[in-house]
Image (cartoon, rainbow, N blue to C red):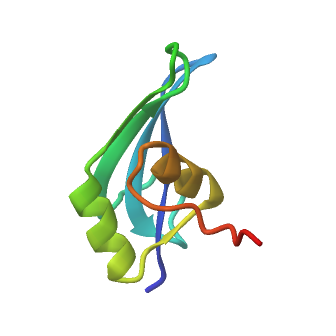
Amino acid sequence: MAVKMRLTRLGDKKAPFYRIVVADSRAARDAKYIDLVGTYNPLTTPEEIKIDAEKATTWIKNGAQPTDTVKALLVKAGVTQSSKNSK
């Protein structure tokens, strides 16, 4: 089973709120998930990102692949380092 860390959408129309979850990559966006890792609220100023760093690093070490958006949120929250190579 391929496992991904990704966002699931909650909230009202034009007022999104996201959960950062670990889910089977073949499941639908808002389907059942394996574990809740954190939340992301893009509407507050500044953006509110709450991530359980211990859970996130454990899942990444166990092979969960974060999506590009989740990877950027993990870097913003200081959970992981940016993977860009600098010369």
Pinpoint residue 44: horizontal percent, then vertical percent. 49, 14
For the residue pair 73 and 38, the one nearer the viewer reads as 73
**Res. 30 in view:** no
**Res. 79 in view:** yes
For the residue pair 5 and 77, the one nearer the viewer reads as 77
Q: Residue furthest left?
A: 54
Q: Would residue 77 appear left or right of 82 to someone viewing this image?
A: left
Q: Residue at x 44, y 60 (%)?
A: 80
Q: Residue at x 30, y 64 (%)?
A: 34
Reply above or below: 38 against 40.
below
Reply above or below: 69 against 43.
below
Q: Residue at x 72, y 68 (%)?
A: 86
Quarter of the N terminus within the rendering: bottom left
Q: Residue furthest right?
A: 87
Reply above or below: 56 against 43.
below
Pinpoint residue 62: horizontal percent, then vertical percent. 33, 82
Pinpoint residue 45: horizontal percent, then vertical percent. 52, 13
Q: Image quadrant of residue 22? A: bottom left
Quarter of the C terminus within the rendering: bottom right
Q: Residue furthest front?
A: 87
Pinpoint residue 51: horizontal percent, then vertical percent. 32, 45
How many numbered discs, if any? 0
Reply above or below: 13 against 72.
above
Q: Residue at x 32, y 71 (%)?
A: 59
